[in-house]
Amino acid sequence: MTTPEATAPSNFIRHIIEADLKANKNNGKVKTRFPPEPNGFLHIGHAKSICLNFTLAEEYNGTCNLRFDDTNPEKESIEFMEAIEKDILWLGFQWHEKHHASDYFEQLFDYAVQLIKQGDAYVDDLTPEQIREYRGTLTEPGKESPNRNRPVEESLDLFYRMRAGEFADGAYLLRAKIDMASPNINMRDPALYRIRRVHHQRTGDKWCIYPMYDFTHCLSDAIEGITHSICTLEFEDHRPLYDWVLDKLNTPCHPQQIEFARLQLEYTVMSKRKLNQLVTEGHVSGWDDPRMPTLAGMRRAGFTPASIRDFCERIGVTKKDAWIKMDVLESCIREDLNENAPRRMAVLKPLRLVIENYPDEAEEIYDIANHPQKPEMGTRKVPFSKVLYIEQDDFAENPPKKFKRLVEGGEVRLRGSYVIKCERIIKDEAGDIIELRCSYDPATLGKNPEGRKVKGVIHWVSAKHAIPAEIRLYDRLFRQPNPDAEAHFLDALNPDSLQILENCWVEASLAKAEKESRYQFERTGYFCVDSVDSNDQKLVFNRTVTLRDTWAK
């Protein structure tokens, strides 16, 4: 077996697993699972759990299951299940077995019957308001329900009739009989089953009662033979209930629940409820909006699986909640794309430039490297002609100090081409600059001009050959590191999180750029071909990240 320490940083979960293996616990097996609820798209926080569960299983020659926790059909759908599967595969992981909690509905019902027969569960008819009143507080014990000592036979009869659909939604529920004075409120006779007439995406209308998460999860783990049930810290207080259910039912397998700190990332939200609100209220274009922290959104923005796995490894696994800075995530994708993204030239805010002493119909084709440090990535053909587009910001009529780009009477090198000199400026009636008239030095192709030093280099595209494109400049969705610190998280939305530039030009080699292909636009940033709106008639690029962290500025 490969030693995990040789491939990944150690953490307390690895220490637990290694101790279990050394003691031959679980017959030396490691079996994990990733159990999402299909009520939304996966986000970057789920990626941390995915990477942890699948990687641990792989490192210790074990297996990892995918299990959909589909016990709340009102908010769940097949669409979400398919999106979750796609995201896991895109991250580079493959589950050993795929299950659904609904696969076990009959077994879970039988387990509930067993608890009733043992005197460990009872059917209650208190209203939700009464249950809250009876539960007590963090400092005061709860009160027992008047139905707590209902005869076993009566609870059994009521439970079977609940399943048969004889009662209205909410009329009864099944509760565990534990301890209403427990300092852990989760142990004060928690609900195990509720009546809910909702069509289920897999079982249809077969069931009108559904098991609660705390009852379903531990038993699903046990049925599948999971050895290490890894979850986030909010379930730490639920662990006694997890163990209580398995102990009372004496299941053949008793998985060990281990909690770790969930991901808290600045400038975004991780709550599915809040993400759903952003979608349903139209603050974003959908679950896959490139500003969303969903894996679908990040994929559309241009993030790579490798960058997300790298991010999850960098932040590590701890027992203490902490906020992770957004620039950690952005650094991961910058490093990946700097290493692997081919270079291209694109002009986002074009300014027309005419080289007056260049022959009218002449053209040149340059072989320019796809990556300056990687000759193995080859070259592409870049055409050059008399009329070019350059960036508006690469010319200044009244330049600031240390401006190293083009000015009237000044020279600059065109990337991979000649040195040009701005001879005069053309303005419209409003006084805005609409064109530059320049000259070129034909002796400077691949050479420095004699007797003078040219400091600046700018990018360009040939107007005759360039391809029109729409470029979307995405930025952080929220303007505050912690949106929840506002009175309402929507108050922290960044009004400048999307800027759409419609009159952009990209070099001719991008005419057949495939969806989700990623590039560095030289001197501008990293961009990805949009997977939804880009087509043969209209190229659309999404900005993944700037070349440098400019957020603070």
Image: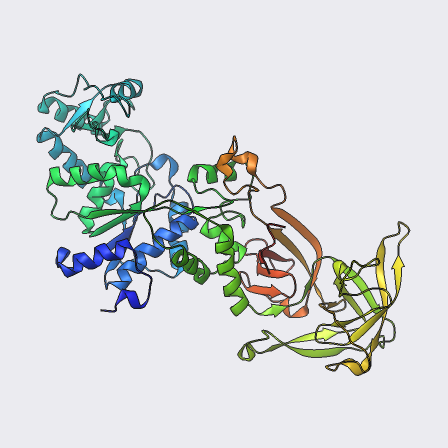
Q: Is residue 113 above or below residue 137?
A: below
In the rendered structure, the answer to whether residue 146 lies left or right of residue 392 reads left
Looking at the image, residue 451 sits to the left or right of residue 346; the answer is right
User: Is residue 487 visible from the viewing direction of this image?
Assistant: yes
Percent of width and height locating residue 441: 82, 78
In this view, the residue in front, 185 or 31, is 185
Q: Is residue 386 above or below residue 324?
A: below
Which residue is outermost to the front? Answer: 401
Q: Residue at x 24, y 45 (%)?
A: 103
Quadrant of the image for the N terminus? Answer: bottom left
- Counting the numbered discs, the total is 0
Tell me if residue 97 can be seen.
no
Percent position of residue 312, x then y: 40, 56
Which of the colour schemes (rainbow, by chain, secondary structure, one colour) is used? Answer: rainbow
Horizontal side of 291 relative to 442 (left or right) equals left
Which of 503 and 335 lies nearest the eye of the viewer? 335
Where residue 206 sits in the image (x, y, percent)?
26, 35
In the rendered structure, the answer to whether residue 477 lies left or right of residue 274 reads right
Which residue is rendered at x = 56% and y = 79% of the image? Answer: 375
Quarter of the figure with residue 285: top right
Farthest residue in the right direction? 429
Q: Residue at x 30, y 56 (%)?
A: 11
**Residue 122 image offset from top left, x and y in percent:** 16, 25
Residue at image coords 29%, 40%: 235
> Which of the 4 image quadrants contains residue 94?
bottom left
